[in-house]
Image (spheres, grey):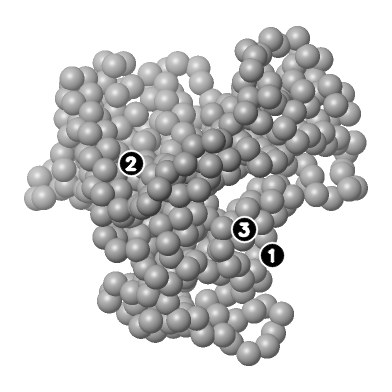
Amino acid sequence: MYDLIIIGGGPAGYRAAERSSASGLSTLLFEKRALGGVCLNEGCVPSKTLLYSAKLFDYAKGGSAKYGVTCDNAKLDHAVVVARKNKVVKKLTLGIAAQLKAGGVTVVSADAAIVGRVDGGYKVSADGTEYEAARLLIATGSAPALPPIEGLKESLASGFAWTNREVLDTKVVPQKFVIVGGGVIGLEMASYFRSAGAEVTVVEMLDSVGGPIDREIASLLQKAYEKKGVKFLLKTSAVKFAQGEVTVKSADGGEAQVIKCDNALVSIGRRAALPEGIEKLGVALERGAIVTDEYMRTSALNVWAAGDVNGKSMLAHTAYREAEVAVNDMAGAADTMDYSAIPAVIYTNPEVAVCGDQGNALDPSLPSGKIVKKVSMNHSGRFMAENEGGDGTFKMVLDGAGKILGVSIIGNPASEIIFGASLMLGRELRSADLRKIVFPHPTVSEIFRETIFQ
């Protein structure tokens, strides 16, 4: 009998396996597809690899001229971009496998099903073999949410419609591309494929893109996309898929509109992917996800859940931390999960990053005495030096006593400095504390301090 069985080898699963093995627990990990899960193989890393190529291409085909650098006859070879993406993914997955092997983790490449309880623990089966462990960690991640839209199932089967998995492996850039969903995945793919030459239309049922991000920041990002030629249909839903076309209808009424396209991406969100046999554990579920407490415990004794499968914060970095909390709880070490200071990033060009309370910052009547400080990113000399013609925005939400509640940024490199907001929120810093921090000059991170003095 193992000390711990982990079902799922994504960010939560493999991080938990590394930590549990290092803690002296004999650990067995099941992964049915590839180590690294969706994030490494079909999401975070592949998409960022494509987006970096697009950013270089945008500069090469004219963007660099503003900096005194010209490049004639620049072109983007999508097949080479995808090949490089595959190389990066393979190298990282091999690295995870090597790390787990070195740590003494047993890895089984198979789809695991929960058999049920046994004396002293739980039983799991895979490929006709049964395994037992005293503890169980469920880290099976998430899958694309696919609404019951007419023709969608058939369009996915034919290859006309894509999810995040297929879009990252396509060898051809569609001439006309429809993206249903203006969240993170939809926006990032709109950014890449527009740079790669596609005519892109984003269909979003809400009146703003970017999901829960600050509305003003979302509006600025949409305008930046529109300058590049991306078309947005807000407050609009897809109502039918057919080969070569997507039918959409506005919430404001009127006739349905048929959009002709070569391919369509469906990216309206994700749902928890529960393992087979989950019902045999009797764990509590809520909206299809496993309910967990601050220790990542489920309602079943000695069963934990981490990552997208608990539906709390579907981000890889959240999954890493949840896995650490779960293993610490198993080992008897004091630790709890805090979701109040988790950063989120949209890796477009320009980048968007947010953390904490957005404060309804577009609304002039802020509740509870909240204060919003907003400055142009051009207050940073480093930003101006590296973003010719760019005018990013930095917003910070404070309470009446000066406590930092949240940060929203649009402008490069938002992804590399947002950790500062996470740290400040986690340590409950106030504006007076921020005034005393010495930032290296010139860096874009100085914008944190500059904002306080405005």
- Mark positioned earlier in the residue sequence (1 or 2): 2
Disc 1: CA contacts within 10 A as few (<14), some (14-19) or many (>=20): few
Q: Answer left or right for 288 relative to 410.
A: left
Helix, strand or loop at mark 3 = helix
Quadrant in which residue 241 is drawn: bottom left
List the residue tagged with mark 1: 207
List the residue tagged with mark 2: 40
Helix, strand or loop at mark 1 = loop
Q: Quadrant of the N terminus?
A: top left
The kind of residue on which mark 3 rests is Lys
Q: Is residue 136 visible?
A: no
Q: Is residue 96 visible?
A: yes
Q: Nearer the viewer, mark 2 or mark 3?
A: 3
Q: Answer left or right for 356 relative to 304.
A: right
Outermost residue toward the left in this view: 128
Q: From the viewer's perspective, is residue 69 above or below residue 43?
A: above
The kind of residue on which mark 1 rests is Asp
The kind of residue on which mark 2 rests is Leu
Residue at image position (66%, 56%) is: 223
- Mark positioned earlier in the residue sequence (2 or 3): 2
360 or 254, which is in the foreground?
A: 254
Residue at image position (69%, 65%) is: 207
Q: Answer left or right for 380 relative to 386.
A: right
List the residue tagged with mark 3: 227
